[in-house]
Amino acid sequence: MKQTVSVKNIGLRGVTVADTKISFIDGEKGILIYRGYRIEELAERSTFMETAFLLLNGYLPSTKELDNFENQMRKNRELPDYIYDCLRRLPMDADPMDMLQGAVPLLAMVDPDLHEDSRDANFRMAQRLIAWLPAVTAAWHRIRNGRDPLPPDTTLSHAANFLWQLTGTKPDAEMARYLDCCLVLHADHTFNASTFACREVCSTRAHMYAAVAAGIGALSGSLHGGANARVMAMLLDLESEKDLAGWVKDHIDRGERIMGFGHAVYKTMDPRAAYLKDMATKLGKSKGMEKWDRLSKDLERIATTEFVARGKTEIKPNVDFFSAPVYFMMGIPRDLFTPIFAISRIAGWSSHVIEEKFAEAQDKPMLYRPQAEYVGNYCGLMGCVYDPLTARQEQELS
Ligand code: ACO
């Protein structure tokens, strides 16, 4: 029997709610591992397809297993026809994260495995979602710009095909590799807000798509995945700012947050940010856009110094701080930064849904059902009767 904790813990910080074998963070040392492998190693030597296989299955695939997995993914890239009709009927200024969240239940309706709650069926649903989220994001981007969606190119890798379907241009190998690497870095992150949302939803035995739609909603928020687009908005605003230090001080004094800084778990540099920082430098050079690399590093240095001066030594750049200039220099529209996060995190979300549903008996979590402390009125219990007329009259008189 699991222990019941009855202490109030706002935001569930430090509360362990389940076991997981998928990923692990050491927030003090700045370490992130997926299924036992350091994120830096995976970013350097793995691909997003291999990483997705690892997250879903718990081990790195053999060459044959990876081939089969990738071939299945390539076949899954075709969207059902009615999705295009639905996208064409949306307001063309809809936020891509709202579009993506709305597209997931529409895709559920054609998934032949939707009502078979077995591990294999969930695995197949995960494979469809991993292939469909980039396809629907690219299709939406083209439709909202008055263009026709492009068919997938099965000769291209997952990341390269996304860039092709988005832009209509086959990306060079360097660009495709950079994006693939970003997808590896964002693929999982233990019980972050969006993953917890997925796990919470499927703990009710709701299906994979219901869980993923919830995860996309949670990711969209500015304190979570939505921060990356806001980092870029901030950098664009600061492009010609002469007094960065003054701006940082004023911003914090006004109680506003510096987007892309701070983390609920890391007390040191987020290892993903460290990797992306280096990528921003390389991209800045290869694209002749060094000014964004310089600006983000200047802001990092100045904001870190300011946080230290205020005794907040643990506030450092997180993954969103350097992914923003990286995506911008890759030519990706700002409002697609967070959907790209989702295109990657779907690998982690679906792995967590499978773990939540099919963990071994002794680790199996139960339906999430926390408590809240009621701090409202007790009228009914104290003998008062329900009398809305008097309540309204009292309100009008006051
Ligand atoms: N800018 C300014 N102040 C900050 C920042 C920031 N980015 N982050 C934390 N603080 C301050 C808070 O104002 C608060 O100050 P106070 O104690 O004087 O009130 C203190 O640090 C603690 O803040 P909390 O929100 O309680 O700390 P938490 O660890 O929960 O914060 C969070 C984590 C929400 C990510 C926060 O750092 C933040 O809002 N960052 C900006 C948004 C962002 O980048 N989000 C992406 C996170 S990574 C991801 O989800 C993929």
Image (cartoon, rainbow, N blue to C red):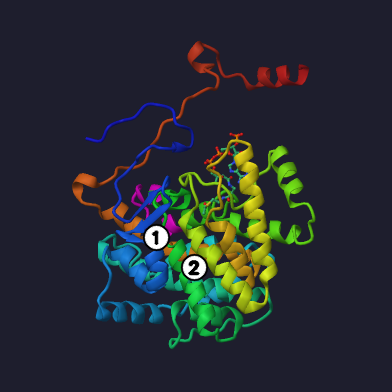
From the viewer's side, name the closer residue of 31 and 139: 31
User: In the rendering, which numbered label is found on residue 282?
Assistant: none
| Residue 199 belongs to magenta span | no
Residue 1 rendering spot, x and y as whole percentages: 22, 35
User: In the rendering, which numbered label is found on residue 348?
Assistant: 1
Helix, strand or loop at mark 1: helix
Residue 86 rendering spot, x and y as whole percentages: 57, 71
Helix, strand or loop at mark 2: helix
Q: Which residues are magenta?
A: 200-212
Q: Earlier in the sequence, mark 1 or mark 2?
A: 2
Hey, what amino acid is under mark 2?
A: Cys
Res 5 quadrant in image: top left
The alpha-carbon separation of the residues under discs 1 and 2 comes to: 14 Å
Q: Residues within 10 Å of mark 1 (few under 14, many from 20)?
A: many
Total residue callouts: 2
Using residue 367 as the reference point, say whether residue 209 is left or right of it: right
| Residue 205 belongs to magenta span | yes
Hey, what amino acid is under mark 1?
A: Gly
In front: label 1 or label 2: 2
Asked if residue 322 is positioned above or below residue 130 in the image, the reply reads above
Residue 163 rendering spot, x and y as whole percentages: 55, 79
> In the rendered image, which residue does mark 2 sit on?
182
User: Which quadrant of the frame does ligand 1 lie within?
Assistant: top right
From the viewer's side, name the closer residue of 196 and 103: 196
| Residue at the extreme top | 383
Q: Residue at x 58, y 61 (%)?
A: 322
Q: Residue at x 50, y 57 (%)?
A: 216
Residue 110 rendering spot, x and y as whole percentages: 42, 71
Res 38 quadrant in image: bottom left
Asked if residue 98 is positioned above or below residue 6 in the image, the reply reads below
Does any portion of residue 112 appear in the rendered image?
no
